[in-house]
Image: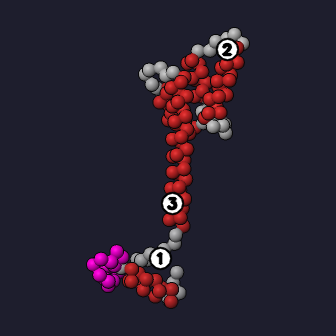
Amino acid sequence: MKTQTMTQYLTEIKTIVDQITAAGSTIEDENILMYTINGLPPAYQAFITSIRTTLHPISLDDLYSLLLSEEIHIQTESLKNLSMAETGTALYSYRGRGRRGRGRSMQSGSRTGSNDLFPHAKYVIKEDILLQNAGID
């Protein structure tokens, strides 16, 4: 398959099969199926396993439809993983200040109100300012 789309890949296989048929030879559907799945890249490994272990034979038309659907699925998953990796990298690269084992409880800070989402923010900010003023990074 290399860098081809699934449609290009399946068109190439169909062209080869048509040429073999035009030359007067026949090729069984099972051989076409095996040739087709053997040319798939590693991203299709789970798909290949499911085709090889199915109890009922699959038609070439069904295989081609499933391969087109699988291509869409793999592209969608790839984009989702890429998006998650970018988000994870951004979160990972953020350098926040930790408590640095001072032994104080986060609950010792003053609360600004019961509806405050970050009741300890003033305490953490004050501690960070003190650390910066002390030259501790």
Residue at the image position 39 percent from the left and 80 percent from the top: 121
Q: What are the residue bounds of the magenta stretch? A: 102-119
* Mark 1: few/some/many CA within 10 Å (<14, 14-19, 20+): few
Give the CA separation, mark 1 to mark 3.
18 Å
- Mark number for residue 50? none
Which residue occupies the foreground of this view, 93 or 47? 47
- Who's the residue at 49% across and 27% down the image? 51
Q: Identify whether 66 is placed above or below 122.
A: above
Point 44% across, 75% down: residue: 98
Residue furthest right as drawn: 23
Label 1 to label 2: alpha-carbon separation: 71 Å
- Tell me, for residue 88, which label it has, or none: 3
Q: Is residue 135 left or right of residue 110?
A: right
Which residue is drawn at the image coordinates 58% and 15% (left, top)? 28
Residue 44: x, y in percent?
A: 55, 36
Instruction: Please provide percent x and percent y for residue 57.
Output: 47, 20
The secondary structure that dominates the magenta segment is loop
Q: In the rendered structure, which amino acid carries the disc numbered 2?
A: Thr
Mark 2 vs 3, N-terminal side: 2
Of the two numbered discs 1 and 3 on the same chain, state the one appearing first in sequence: 3
Q: Provide the residue designation for mark 1.
A: 97
The quarter holding residue 10 reads top right
Q: Is residue 4 left or right of 130 when viewed as pictured?
A: right
Residue 33 located within the stretch drawn in magenta: no
